[in-house]
Image: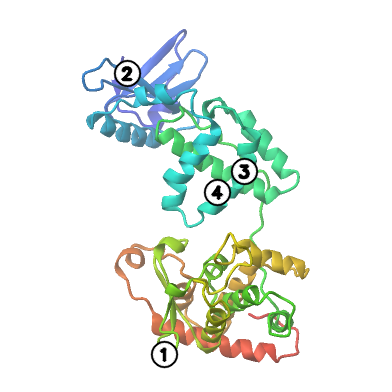
Amino acid sequence: MPKIALSEAVIAKLKPPASGRADYTDSRTPGLTLRLTATGHGSWSLRYRPRGGKPERLTLGSLKAVTLAEARQRAKALNGSVADGQNPQAIRRKAKGAMSFDALADAYLTGHAMPGKASWKNDLGYLKRARSAWAGRSAESIVRSDVVALLEAIRATAPVSANRTRSVLVTLFNWAVETGLIPANPAAGVRARTKETPRERVLTVDEVRDLWAMTGPDGSMDPNIAGALRLILLTGQRPGEIAGLVRTEICDLNDGTRARIELPASRTKARRSHLVPLCPLAAALVREGIARNVGSDAVFASAFASRTTLARHSLSQALRRKKLSYTPHDLRRSCLTGLASLGIPREDRLAVAAHAPSDIHGAHYDKYERMREKRAALVAWETRIGEMVGAGRQVQAA
């Protein structure tokens, strides 16, 4: 078995054997082997000897689905588990045929999505159709054609949901391959089912004024939903974070210079804690919510007994029932675009939005919260909202 320093260029030059199969062992990664067959199929595997056992061979995935870098990463992780006394192939044999797709989805949610994703409930929702379609089937029996058929069925009525489902399935199956539960990812290489156009919707002045009226005390909207929608527009925060506000996240509410929301890392998209200044109008909304929901931990309580705080989708449904053309996230965009129109520096707008810095300095060294700057920006925006609510001309909020 030849041992060579594999690279993408070297692999591209390898020719399938005239018959049978040929194995090439990577000289950089112990045990990592590329197998080519006469039919042109390539696959990755790891050869190892477990402690006190016989040599084993563990499939890591096909050459088309798994890059050299990914194969090396998986092999390195598995070699580590072997060094710790585990036998990955024995673990796979024990699970093979016994793990249903439904069980795999549960394992993914509890082992990966819940601990690492603030949006794990989205994954839970997008997996419902897959779990229904593949009920009773083993995870390893799912193939590419099954994934395509499922996504096409979803696309027929919900094109964007088909794309989101595809993304979740790719992540789920990648995780399952990396943890040794299945040999390959059947969703790898499956294209998005529809081309999406990023939303650019920003509310007009008239729309801001109408929203303010329908979310006021004389409007017909549920007061908790109304308060949450107003707070999104005033602060520019993500709808799910505002809907899920609890009292322990509200600090110094009666101090006009220090009132703020303190979102823990577990509740933010970037998994970083985030401080949001509460300026006068925003602080008043929070006070009203707390006073309205006495006995509840929620700032904006759900009408359903099974929940404490509002569900994110309740905000979207409220706007749809009013036959409005914008979404809760468009309120966030309107705020952040409005801050730009007021001349607020980009660094301060990014800080308000809790957008993770893209450079090393911002991500790892600059820990300044910019509370003074964020508060000044949102005070200016509240003043602009006041002007828009009384305005009569049809111009964009930005």
Q: Earlier in the sequence, mark 1 or mark 3?
A: 3
**Amino acid type, residue under disc 2 in the picture:** Glu
User: Are circles 2 and 3 on residues that touch, CB within 8 Å?
Assistant: no
Q: Position of residue 214 (x, y in %)?
A: 73, 80
Distance (Cα) linking label 2 and label 3: 36 Å
Q: Secondary structure at mark 4?
A: helix
Distance (Cα) linking label 4 and label 3: 9 Å
Query: How dense is the environment of label 1, judged by Cα within 10 Å: few (below 14), some, or many (20 and up)?
Result: some
Q: Secondary structure at mark 3?
A: helix
Q: Residue at x 38, y 37 (%)?
A: 69
Distance (Cα) linking label 1 and label 3: 46 Å
User: Are circles 4 and 1 on residues that touch, CB within 8 Å?
Assistant: no
Residue at the disc numbered 4: 123
Q: Earlier in the sequence, mark 4 or mark 1?
A: 4
Q: Secondary structure at mark 2?
A: strand
**Amino acid type, residue under disc 4 in the picture:** Asp
Indicate which label's residue lies in the foreground, 1 or 3. Answer: 3
Q: Earlier in the sequence, mark 2 or mark 3?
A: 2
Distance (Cα) linking label 4 and label 1: 39 Å
Residue at the disc numbered 3: 128
Q: Quadrant of the C terminus?
A: bottom right
Residue 28 visible (yes or no): no
181 relative to 326 in the view: left or right? left
Q: Which mark identifies residue 56?
A: 2
269 relative to 159 in the view: left or right? left
Query: How dense is the environment of label 4, judged by Cα within 10 Å: few (below 14), some, or many (20 and up)?
Result: many
Indicate which label's residue lies in the foreground, 2 or 3. Answer: 3
Q: Position of residue 346 (x, y in %)?
A: 47, 76
